[in-house]
Image: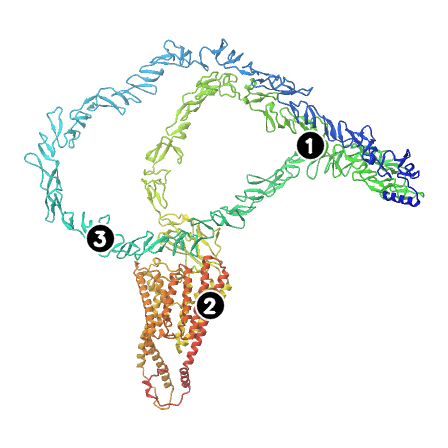
Amino acid sequence: MITISIYCFLLIGIIKNEKPCLSPCQTCNGGSGTCKTCKTGFILNDNSCICQPGYYTIDQITCIECLKPCATCLPNGGGCSTCLDTSNQIAPSCSCKEGYIMNTSTHYCQNCPNNCKICSSTSVCTQCHNNYWNNGGICSQCLKPCINCSSNSNCITCIDTQHQTPPQCKCAEGYVMNTVSYICDLCQFPCNTCQTTVNHCLTCASTYTINSTDHKCSCLNNEFESNSNPKTCQSCTSPCQTCSTSATNCTSCVNGLNRKLENTQCICEDGYYENITCVPCQLPCINCLSELVCTSCKDPIHQSGPQCVCPTKYYMNTSFNCESCISPCINCISELQCISCEQNYYITGYNCIKCELPCYNCVDNATKCISCAFPNQIVSNDTCVCNDGYFMDPLLLSCQPCIHPCSKCQDYGNYCTDCAITFVMSTSIPNSCVCPNQTYEVLTSIPTICQSCTQPCDTCSGTTNHCLTCIDINQSVDTSHQCQCNPGYTMIAVNCIVCLSPCLQCLGNSSHCTQCKDPLHQISNGECICPSGYLNDNDYNCIPCQSPCSTCSVNDTHCDSCIDSNHEINDTFQCICKDTFYSDTLNTCQQCTQPCFLCDINGCLSCIDSNQIIDSFQRCVCKQGYYEVGVNCFQCVVPCQTCEINQDHCLSCVDVNQNLINNNCICNDGYFEINNICQQCQYPCTKCEFTNDHCLECLDINHDLINNKCICKFGFGSSGIDLLSCQPCEYPCLDCSTSISTCISCTDNNIYYLEDYKCLCKQGYFQVLNQCMSCSPQCSICEEQPEKCLSCSDPNHYLEQNNCICKLGYYSDNNMKCFQCQLPCVTCISNQDYCTSCIDQDNQFLNDGICQCKQGYYINNFKCELCTQFCKKCNSNDECIQCQDGYILQNALCTIPKCIDNYFMNDQGECIQCIQNCQICNDPTSCLSCFDQFYYDNQSCIPCSNKCQTCINDSNFCTSCKDLNQQLIDNQCICKEGYYENDQACEQCDNKCKICNNLLFCTLCNQLEHLVLSNNQCVCEDGYFEFNNNCQLCNKICQTCSQTSDNCLSCNQQLNRKKEKNTCICQNGYFENENQDCWPCNSDEGKIIKDCQYKNCSDNIWTFGEDCDDGNDLLRDGCSNCQIDQNYTCINTLLKTSLCFKCTDNCIECQMNEVINQLVCIKCNYGFYIQQNQCVKCAEQCLDCKTSASNCLSCRYQNNKLDKCQLCQSNSGYYPDQFNNKCYTKCGDSLKTSEEECDDGNLLPGDGCNQFCKIEKKFLCQNGICIIPEYPVPLLFSYGDTSLYNKIRKFKLEYNVLVNVTQDSMIEKSIKFYIKNQLTINPIDIPYQIQTQYSLNNDNNVNFSLIIEILFNRSTKNERLLIKYYNGSQIISHQGYQQITTEIETVIQEYIQIDQSEIAQVGTATSSNQILLYIMAVMAGGAILFGGLEIFYNLLDTIQMLSYLKYINTQYPYNLQQFFEFFGFAQLSFISKYLKLQQLIDPYIAYEKLKPIPEKIQQDDMNSLYIINGSSIVIVWLSLLGIYILSNIVPIILSRIRLKYYNEIPGKLNFELKCKFWFLALKIYILELCCMIVQEFFYSGIIRTFIATAYDYSFSMTLQLSALELDSQDNLVKLSSYLALFALGIYLFTIYLVTMKCGDPNILLERNQNKFKYMSLFEGIKNKMYSKYYNAISLIQKLSFILILIFGYQTPFYQTINLLILSILQIIYLFVFKPLDDYKEFIKQFTCEINKAIAILFILGLVFDQESKTLSDDLRSIIGWICIGNISFILVIQIIIDAIQQWMLLIKKYKKLRRYAQKFYNFFVPPPPNQVDHRIFTIGDFENT
């Protein structure tokens, strides 16, 4: 705009042709630069226009005022050239000097607060000078020794930087602060630390001790100061009490050590000797050098030597003098107590007793010898006995010699007990010595001796070879008194031995023959031997070897070689056929047929493969678990139990927990595989793998599957008996673990805390059941009720009768906290200013809780003062708010009445309203003064800020403040000191806080003594506590405290104190004196303090820390090392030497009884007890006892089960264990002890009592005899119809033995029924009936059984019937044994409940098919009358085939199963059941021993016996035979019935004649029928019947073949088996015969006889290459069908698929060869086979589903309906085609039918008579028949 103005001005000048003046000249001289006048804002100076002082210009057009605080400024306003405040401001910035702040109004510098370097206002400092700190905007001087600090307690720099460290600037250890210079002075040695002065020690240098009185450090009394650098205190060496210069330079000796000072050394006093310590010489020593070396004795006359011992026969009395022992004592310890005796005496107790003869010396008793009184005597077993060769004279007791030949004797000389050498004891004369046999007595020898006879003399005389008798009975004495052998004997040495047979005579030895017994024997090299092929028998006769032996030895069957080379000799030397050979004759062997390894003529005996076994036909078959490959068997691979084809093609599984799926063994759900064995998953896993707890699926939805572990969901815990189920955690657990009550987290951590897995109420809560209820806010701890306080939350509360009440002057807010009332309230409620009493009671009154001044008063400093004159109400002395009557309020003053505020008085005296918010005005558009909180600007009253009561120019430029607690600083409302801003209001700081940011954040404290700022809280200094808003000094025992002076928070360790339960006690090793100082226990004062337990064993005085102190270092003198020796007691007196006394013998603890003044034993040695102050030995069985010898405390041999002390007595079965002090038992000694369950006298297992004397399982033992008791054992099993859809399940409970019943229904009342599944056991909830069956004998013994019939009203699967006995012990067997079993269970066969609608649908389908069959039956009846019965044979086959489909081994759906049951009538087995043939042979057959048959067949009450099942076929054949016979007899009978078929009256046909004609017609029909039967019976009728019954025939035969028992012990069973084989032969022969006849080209059907013989084979069948074999193929198909059905039963898949293949082959045969003549019959058969194959295909799907379990029940039911539809379609097709065929047959035979109709008509309307043709009896019309 300025530039445009200049251009415009120049343009005007140009237009006027004038030169413009240059700016800033207003006028100038001719456009020159000389100005005449200047523009506004400029002044003329030397013809130039310049800006006024305080202004500057940029464009020379306008002057701009300099910005304050510039007085003048630089060109362009770039800075100040001079400042307003020249003394305190510096150009060009003109900012205030340090210590000043600029006034924003005047722009002059004002002083900051004192000592302030930088401030934000004249009253608020932001940075202080050095040595000062900012104390809430005020600079406070730092307290020395701080130089710079941030608070009084937080130094930044210190005066003595070397020895002082912030923030406390305390002196380093070893220094003390100089209170004048605040420099740290070094403590004076030996002070280590000091206080106040350098020599006022707190602690001492090492080795020095402080004196707690004068606080000086010095050496102890028993120490000396060394001259080392630094000096140290070193202990005087004991026994020096004090010393100088060195540790051993004694100046005094320790008292009580029995030492004396001699030449600066402490030596032992007289009567003591040196042994580290001075040990007193023991009497009788007076003086001694050591314990064993005396230098003088008490009794110098009798005592001598270094031990001062008494001589022999003397003893030392109690005065330590020697006195003489009394004879016969050698040594004694008192006058009456000998310890050794003279010879010929023994000591007992302390007495000498003389030994008894023959003892000379003895021990223990007078007859226990250790030496003997007489010669030739020795001691043996403590007794004097004579030497060998002597006997004891019973009177003299001396030894006398024995009389020869006795070498030992007794009682007298010739009563021998042993003989001299060569003599023996006589067997005829007792106790006498004689020469033995084969000897004689040499009388010439002195003494005599016995000399041996020379053998073979047995007895001799005179000389050794003069025989009297011989030693061998086979010898005789010859005339020269020599022994010679009898005949048949030979001499060997001195004996004669008999010649061995067959020797008759021998020489040299018994087998060297010189003559044989018979001619067959021949002598060869001195032996009689038999020829080859012979051997000697027992009588040594030559007998021939038995075949097949070639040669033999030992006996005639002991072969040495064999006849046949295929023989070999076995270990028993028999000729047996070699391996793989067998004996076909006695002498020859034939090769076995593989796989036989060993065999006989009947078959195999062993197999070449060890995995093969021999069956009942002696064939080698594979063991179970093996499959056959060639001639070898290979093991099935686990888990296959049985297999075929290959090792893993399973037929059955080893584990019952596996299912067979596609010939693979797969674990059931709930199991997993380990090494091919199914292990049960560990609950709660319901599916797992790898391990039993590697879960794949969990028990219920309350489990989470985490890392393959079933873990209870969050908020759930384990519960139940087995802790397997998860239940919600018990409140207040948020989550729980091992049980629902074991918490691991709580629902609300603000209320609960976790401790020991329990959710407990936090402080401030109390527990009501499982709930934590909050305490009232005033309670920090409460119980039972919220308001029942145990402690208060606010220190301003006090507790009174479980109520927290605020202190006087405090009020309780809504949170039940106590706050101080605000003046003028003395007391208040609800809040700080809702008063209940006021400070100025005279001039104040309460108005709704507010202390208000009376009218005419205003409050000032919380008290009421009188308002000014004319003022009725006022806020202050100069602020009136209501005037007295007649006065008006104006400007807070009462004046004469004027217009009210916001109005002004105009000239007419009217009050006109001012502008809004204007208080005083003169006109309606302006304002002189706005109301408070408004300011005037631009004809409006604008609101001030919320803080301002009044303001000017700007809403934030306050001139007064709204809040009384605010002050005006620089026109800003700031909270006063002691207040802080909160929501634009000022609230009071804590009463100790001067400046704060909030109630809990203080920045400056009030100037109270010992009050400091710490962590923004005003707290008392350490050593002080707050009380009544003042800091009070703590007790000197506390370093810090709270609430009270002695409630310590911490302790001063330098005062040797430690904290314990809010008080400071002396540290260990210190005690508290009367001045509450902790002194060391090792001081003299501490020695007598009991708590100190001072101990010093070298001070020779007893103190509390010692057991004793006898003043010496002698060991075992009663007090050793300040401990009382065993068997001693001591009397202790404080600070005196202990007096010790020895206890009596065996007493280990005694005490001095001051009443009787003697020692009293209070504790004896182990094994002794106190009796009359003496320790008496316990009884032998006691190790320790009390009060009496037999009152044992512990046993020598403890028997724990008897709980009493006893000696181990072997006759009771107990033996002593000396090492372990126990009695032990010996198993097998026949003595049963309480530790043994039994003892049968041996250590053999298996006899009821094993080698550990434990009763073996199932045995009962008593008195060493063990038996197997026959306990009553309940047996529970199911029986009856257990088919899937039968809702009735029957169970039978029996016992293995007869039971003894004591009352009716006892067993029924003692049992309860339960249904058990995999997870739960529940009481039975299904209707059931119980029927009891029992027979009772005279002894109340019952053959008992219980029938339980359960009627299921729901489906059941994988459930078991469980019976629990609640009083099973009442059930007793007839032998008296109680029942042990408590529960028994059995499987409940699966049952599926069928919906009633489905039952109705199945009934409808069955009824429909039943109608179809009725229609067929009617048609079949017509066929019988009119011919064409053969049409229905195929229908019969079809129905029979359908009836057998139910035996496919799968579980049919309900609809299909019921449908198949409908066809059961087609089986001929109903005949045998109707005739009850089985009942006839029941008594002769053990059905339980029969081999099993397919289960479904067995459920139809069938067994394997052919003689029963085949009886129906036999009855059919017998019926056929009967018809044949009848057909032969009836014509004969009818031929004998001859009637006259004419009337005597011609032309008259009466009724009688008509009847005769009808009879004649019937007779002709019967004759024709009989003729046809007779003609077709052989063989067409037989073949037709066989084909018609082939299904039943094959079924009964194959059923027996599947359970063949040719070697059965039951003859009927064996007969049945052979009959079945015979029947099979007949069937195969029939197939062969039919095949041959069908293929025989020589049979010409045109011949009438062939027509009747084989018509059934060819009727309706094409005579083509393969078609003609139709009937043979039909027989093969029927047999194959039944064979597959029965033999394939165990493998349902193969069973079904083979049936399907069989049906497909039949379809192919029919389709390819079309063997039937009649196309309609072909269609019928073809569609039948097609639908049958489709039905079997769907059944195959059901079989597969049985293994895989993939189909739902609904889908299975649909498949069932499809099969029903297919089968029904078969029947419909059969009916339609059969009806057509039957109708066509009727049409073909219409003429005959018409003739019958005409005859029927003529019967009622007779025709005219005709001439009778007499040929009627000779001509037969066969062509029309």
- Circle 1 packing at 10 Å, graded few (<14), some (14-19), many (20+), is some
Residue under label 1, please give it: 1016
Mark-to-mark CA distance, 2 and 3:
70 Å
Q: Residues within 10 Å of mark 2 (few under 14, many from 20)?
A: many
Percent position of residue 1101, x then y: 51, 17
Amino acid type, mark 3: Ser
Is the Cβ of the residue at disc 2 closer than 8 Å to that at disc 3? no
Contact check, label 2 and label 1, Cβ < 8 Å: no
Q: Secondary structure at mark 1?
A: loop
Q: Earlier in the sequence, mark 2 or mark 1?
A: 1
Label 3, secondary structure: give it: loop
Determine whether the residue tagged by mark 2 lies in a helix, strand or loop: helix
The mark tally for this picture is 3
Name of the residue lying farthest toward the bottom: 1546
Mark 2, residue position: 1766
Across and down, in percent, residue 165 comes to 65, 25
Which residue is disc 3 drawn over? Answer: 565
At label 2, the amino acid type is Asn
How would you rate the neighbour count of disc 3 (Cα within 10 Å): few for under 14, some for 14-19, many for 20 or more?
few
Q: Quadrant of residue 1496?
A: bottom left
Q: Nearer the viewer, residue 1642 or 453?
A: 1642
Q: Earlier in the sequence, mark 2 or mark 3?
A: 3
